[in-house]
Image (cartoon, rainbow, N blue to C red):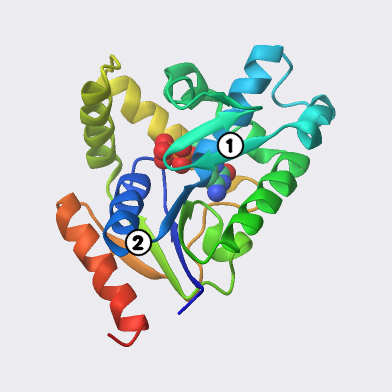
Amino acid sequence: MNNFVVAIDGPAGSGKSSVSKEVAKRLGFTHIDTGAMYRAVTLYALRLGIDLDDENAYSFINDLSIIYKEGKTFLNGEDVSKEIRSQEVTNHASQPARINAVRDRMVYFQRESLKIGKVIMDGRDIGTVVAPNADLKVFLTASAEVRAERRCKENELKGIESNYDVILKEIIERDRKDSTRKIAPLKQANDAILVDTTNLSIEEVINKIIDLINERLGK
Ligand code: CDP
């Protein structure tokens, strides 16, 4: 088997990235976090001080280099992995994600990385737009409350200060923006398997996805 693509989509804080990262590690796949790429564009746009909702302000997008490699995100060669997790970037991340030119460029980068071989890619539109022919599609969900709790714990571990009520509000707002936007909205693909992780531990979710991959591989 040279090529196998797993698409993991789901709302903010559903555990997509942590689960995908661990599954990739255990099975020898390459993990690509596409949210990190949208966050990098957001950081760049915030630094420039442009109006994030103005689609004409993104003329820089085709000259921007964004690389996600081995868990790190590089913006024009600079490692921005920590900075893209700041509250400011998080709060604004769904704005550039609504711009056509931004999505076209990200989808181009993402499709290029699917050529690597065995890839597990997580995001919002992987099963629907980026990799409609993926070998396995999973849609991860969980209640907004559980997702907010998880995000608080994750931040704590990273030494980032966080407030449960603020995070819950932010998650609900981002879900609303991501699900109602015109292009590539957050949506479960028809052929994706729904996994509700509200009452599952991260280990249980990881094992479930590994079982699904092995099933598809006929193991
Ligand atoms: O980690 P978290 O669930 O908080 O979000 P993320 O995956 O880092 O994504 C940040 C933002 O990028 C999302 O709120 C979406 O607006 C956007 N995004 C997207 O539009 N399409 C993707 N494939 C991935 C992220």
Q: Earlier in the sequence, mark 2 or mark 1?
A: 2
Q: Amino acid at mark 1?
A: Tyr
Residue under the point 50% across and 42% down:
69
Q: Tell me the CA gap for discs 2 and 1.
A: 25 Å
Q: Quadrant of residue 30?
A: bottom left
Q: Residues within 10 Å of mark 1 (few under 14, many from 20)?
A: many
Q: Where residue 197 sits: x, y (%)?
A: 23, 55
Pointer 1 residue? 38
Q: Nearer the viewer, residue 208 or 100?
A: 208
Q: At 61% from the left edge and 60% from the top edge, which residue is drawn?
A: 130
Looking at the image, which residue is at 33% across and 20% down? 166
Which quarter of the figure has residue 55? top right
Left or right of 37? Residue 216 is left
Taking the image as drawn, is residue 183 in sight?
Answer: no
Q: Amino acid at mark 2?
A: Gly
Closest to the camera, between mark 2 and mark 1, is: 2
Screen quadrant of the N terminus: bottom left
Label disc, if present, on residue 29 of the rendered structure: none
